[in-house]
Image: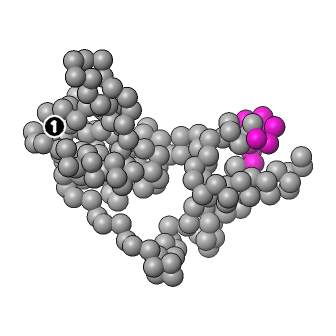
Amino acid sequence: MNHQELSGALEAILFAAGEPLAEDKIAQALDLSLPAIHTAIDSLKKKYNLSSSGIHIVLVENKVQMTTNPAYIEPVRETLALKRNAPLSQAALEVLAVVAYNQPVTKAFVEQVRGVDCSGVVGSLMQKGLLEERGRLELPGRPLLYGTTDHFLMSLGISSLEDLPAPTNSAKVKSDDADQLAF
């Protein structure tokens, strides 16, 4: 497969998928090596990730997705009559910060750090696709473990948790650290 064919196939796959796809899955489907896929993705990013382009190619934790250029979100929302995302409450930002910096965590851990019940907030963040269940802790009652999602990373415009700002207190995330997260 030559460069143009690979580029076209990758564009078609990303457009049709509409969600992040693992690079290794794309490589397997196209019967190509991972380095060849990385090169093709980099090529598409150079082609599309221009300020004047309506489409961007985004890489999030070894997953790639074709997205709308953030500069054109308002006209897209208006044209498609998409509902604006409601801003997150201070409590939601605090929960996200605690989970993001300490994951996987239990709801009890988040409540201990924040000092208040967070059941409703965790449920809301899961509905928004910003948090997900990550299994259960091997303790009596087997409490659920929570972590952030790829949607969380994309909402922040970062590709991995390593891109988060360094917490001011590495032992526990204080509520003030949530101010560093902007949606």
Main SS, magenta region, reads helix
**x and y, in percent, of residue 73 in the image:** 49, 72
> Disc 1 designates what residue?
111
Is residue 32 shown left or right of residue 164? right
Residue 148 higher or lower than 11, as above or below: above
Residue 38 among those drawn in magenta: yes
Residue at position x 70%, y 49% in the image? 41
**x and y, in percent, of residue 38 in the image:** 71, 42
Q: Residue furthest front?
A: 141
The C terminus lies in quadrant:
bottom left
Q: Residue furthest left?
A: 115
Total numbered circles:
1
Instruction: Please say whether residue 44 is visible from this viewpoint.
Output: no
Q: Looking at the picture, which amino acid does disc 1 mark?
A: Glu
Q: Which residues are magenta?
A: 29-40
Residue 166 higher or lower than 20, as above or below: above
**x and y, in percent, of residue 49 in the image:** 62, 62
Residue at position x 86%, y 54% in the image? 5
Residue 29 vs residue 71, the one in the foreground: 29
**x and y, in percent, of residue 138 in the image:** 30, 17
Helix, strand or loop under label 1: helix
Residue 20 vs residue 101, the one in the foreground: 20
Residue 67 among those drawn in magenta: no
Residue at position x 56%, y 66% in the image? 68
Instruction: Please say whether residue 137 is visible from this viewpoint.
Output: yes
Residue at position x 22%, y 35% in the image? 107
- Neighbours of disc 1 within 10 Å: few (<14), some (14-19), many (20+): some
Is residue 146 shown left or right of residue 177? right
Q: Residue furthest right?
A: 2
